[in-house]
Image (tube, helix red, strand yellow):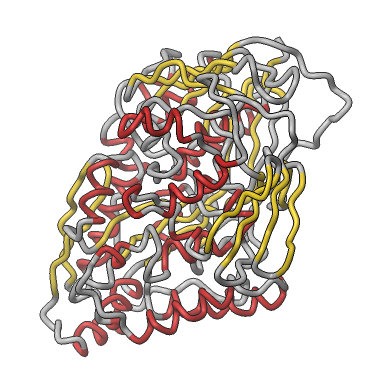
Amino acid sequence: MKPTYLTRRKALQSIGGGAALLGTGVLFGGCGGDDDDSGGGGTDIVDTRPTPVPSVVAKKGGTLKVAMAADPTGLDPSTSRGGGDHNWLYSIFDNMVNNDAKFQVAKGIAEKWEAIDDLTISLTVPQNQFTYHDGTPFSIDDIKYTIERHLDPATKSFAAGSLSSVDKVEIPDSTHAVIKLKTITASIYTILGDRAGMVMSPVPTKKGGADFTNRPVGSGPFKLDAWAVDAQTKLSKFANYRIKDYPHLDNIDIQIVPNSSVRFANLRSGNADLIFVDPKDASAAKSDSAVQFVQYPSTGYTQVNLNISQPPLNDIRVRQALTYSLNRKAILDGIYFGVGELANGPITAASWAYNQSLKPIEEDLTKAKQLLSAAGHANGLTFDLLITSGETDVPLSAMLKSQWARVGINVNLVSRTAEQATVEYRDQKFPMFLVGFSGRADPDLTIFDNFHSKGAFNRASFNKSYTLEESQVSLDAKILKARQIYDQAQRKVFYDDIQKQLVENAHGIFFTHNLNLVGMSKRVRGFTPYGDGKLRLHELWLDS
């Protein structure tokens, strides 16, 4: 008899599926959600990115209306930790350098960057210095302060791991910052183009203290005017921005709308100019003449994070049993409406490091039962799985629970807010956490932070009693070696091997590789699709 699972379609039907809301056109904003709610895998990836038209002159003014599923986890580049936070951060803060749409280094506040030698890079910032939103003047010393703030254990920065190879920062004069590395770090420019390189001044940062994350002061093209949690954030153009006649927009209003059907209805009615389109709405968005629909490959993926320091997950056989007992195709079709690809690891086809020869693990219930028996759990075992109450996570976790039950694994689903879940998982209260990770421009940032024993998102790193297992010791060595090679072809050899080891030894349980699905009103212009799925809202302008 063919097994049946609680799919998203069934879950939506059982609660009305938001169908009654579709015709309202009302912009609701009340509770949080998960803005990494894009696709899974199984259909061909169709890239519908628009062709840029450089000759068009951008119009000035107007308010861009955006609908997001959830608030950011915070707006301090050090302590915020959600992939969706970048949708706010990139407009509020300037980066030392930037990652362009092709994952190449581009200008930030530094107009020149160069490698002095394998362990030394220099950033050149123009003499015409700029100010932060509160009027504090920029100093070249702010680059040193920013990096040292991340590395200070007291900050508890989630970017500290990516900067762990930094030895020191020297300031030889008023226009140059020299970063000295302990080891070769091929991804250093990519790291500085992410939250680790969002430049901060010690004046407003120290003044803000713990509240800086709620009232950030950056030097970016937009400043934060107001943030009503679970409702909206309001950004306005920074009049003294360092680039003349930029940005184009006057304001960006971001409403929090947890229900994907309501977000899509608001886009169609004109109450929103831009949303992330849910996979279930992709077909309707493509066929709607009033909607600009953009679909393109993503670095994002979905997984169950495993704290391998906690027994019995410190036994590879238990972790392997968990992954062999899942039907990924059923997850793809039932939860993500067949949009995306089956995951063969944490690196997607959007990255040069994707291992196309590595196949997704296929369901094998007999093998899963044998592994459990060999690990001493022939009569089964019980786990708690930490989840958040998003409209995707609830049916997905129910499907996982149903599938695992077939081999004697009983899972208790424990729901928390995103804020609570992050803290409690870090504090070793749960062995497993269902998450989506948005991926990064360089594979090192994805792999190190999630799977190195000292990675910011590897919660085993917070267990002081954890003794590294053989697989983790081997993995750590490969991850460090991969970031110390500049030649991309040589690096890919290591990442191919790393991905294979991650999957075979179940350092995580991977389901789907996402697609970026963005819907915009016809009046939105200037959209550039970045493979990391993060919006650069400050680049947009309105045609009417």
Quadrant in which the N terminus appears: bottom left
Q: Is residue 186 above or below residue 104?
A: below
Taking the spot 64% from the left edge, 30% from the top edge, the residue there is 287
Taking the spot 44% from the left edge, 75% from the top edge, the residue there is 503
Q: Quadrant of residue 509?
A: bottom left
Can you give x and y, in whole percent of width and height, for residue 511 in the image?
43, 61
Quick one: 502 or 382, which is closer to the camera?
502
Quick one: 122 or 294, which is closer to the camera?
122
Quick one: 164 or 62, which is closer to the camera?
164
Quick one: 370 or 105, which is closer to the camera?
105
> Count the marks: how many?
0
Q: Quadrant of residue 427?
A: bottom left
Q: In which quarter of the image is residue 351?
A: bottom right
Q: Is residue 419 left or right of residue 482?
A: left
Q: Can residue 103 be seen in this view?
A: yes
Q: Is residue 56 above or below residue 425?
A: above
Quadrant in which the C terminus appears: top right
Q: In this view, does 230 lie to the left or right of 205?
A: left
Can you give x and y, in whole percent of width and height, for residue 110 in the image?
70, 42
